[in-house]
Image: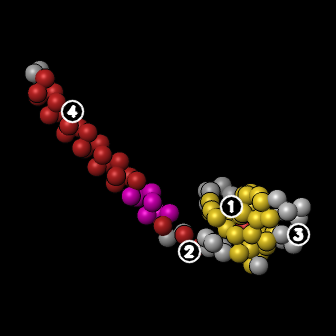
Amino acid sequence: MSPRLFSVRASHLCLVSRRVFSEREFAQTSNLGHHMHDFEYQLNQEVQLTLSAEKGVVIGRAEYSTGTKSYLVRYVTADGRQAEAWWDEAAITDA
């Protein structure tokens, strides 16, 4: 096989594999997309930790197939330090 023919076939294969991956990726993300409104708290929303008076801001969200939704909250601890931690939805409330 000539190098040019191999190059053309490899380019075609690369394009086909990108298209298949893109279709799979789209299917996965489109399935996730309709769940985004299921989050109790929005990004940049102020929340309070349920077992303390500490308040913070939601800076990240995560959803797992085997568990509850989680939120990355940036807050000031009782002793004045800035902290970031992941909390389950039940561990935070509206501020």
Lower position in the chain sequence, tag 4 or tag 2: 4
Mark nearest the camera among 2 and 1 is: 1
Which residue is pictured at 72% across the width and 63% down the height? 74
Lower position in the chain sequence, tag 2 or tag 3: 2
Where in the figure is residue 40, as x and y percent of width and height? 66, 74
Q: Which residue is mark 4?
A: 10
Kind of residue at disc 2: His
Lower position in the chain sequence, tag 3 or tag 1: 3
Where in the figure is residue 73, as x and y percent of width and height? 71, 64
Structural distance between the alpha carbons of marks 2 and 3:
27 Å
Lower position in the chain sequence, tag 3 or tag 4: 4
Q: Is 31 included in the stretch rendered in magenta?
A: yes
Q: Which residue is mark 3?
A: 52
Structural distance between the alpha carbons of marks 2 and 1:
17 Å
Q: Which residues are magenta?
A: 26-32
Left or right of 14? Residue 61 is right
Q: Is 73 included in the stretch rendered in magenta?
A: no
Lower position in the chain sequence, tag 2 or tag 1: 2
Kind of residue at disc 1: Leu
Question: Disc number at residue 11?
Answer: none
- Within 10 angstroms of label 1, few (less than 14), some, or many (20 or more) residues? some
**Marks 2 and 1 close (CB-CB < 8 Å):** no
Structural distance between the alpha carbons of marks 3 and 1:
16 Å
Lower position in the chain sequence, tag 4 or tag 1: 4
* Above or below: residue 19 compared with residue 70: above
Q: Which quadrant is the N terminus positioned in?
A: top left
Q: Which residue is mark 1?
A: 72
Where in the figure is residue 54, as x and y percent of width and height? 83, 69
Which residue is pictured at 77% across the width and 58% down the height? 83
Kind of residue at disc 4: Ala
Determine the main secondary structure of the stretch shown in magenta.
Answer: helix
- Within 10 angstroms of label 3, few (less than 14), some, or many (20 or more) residues? few
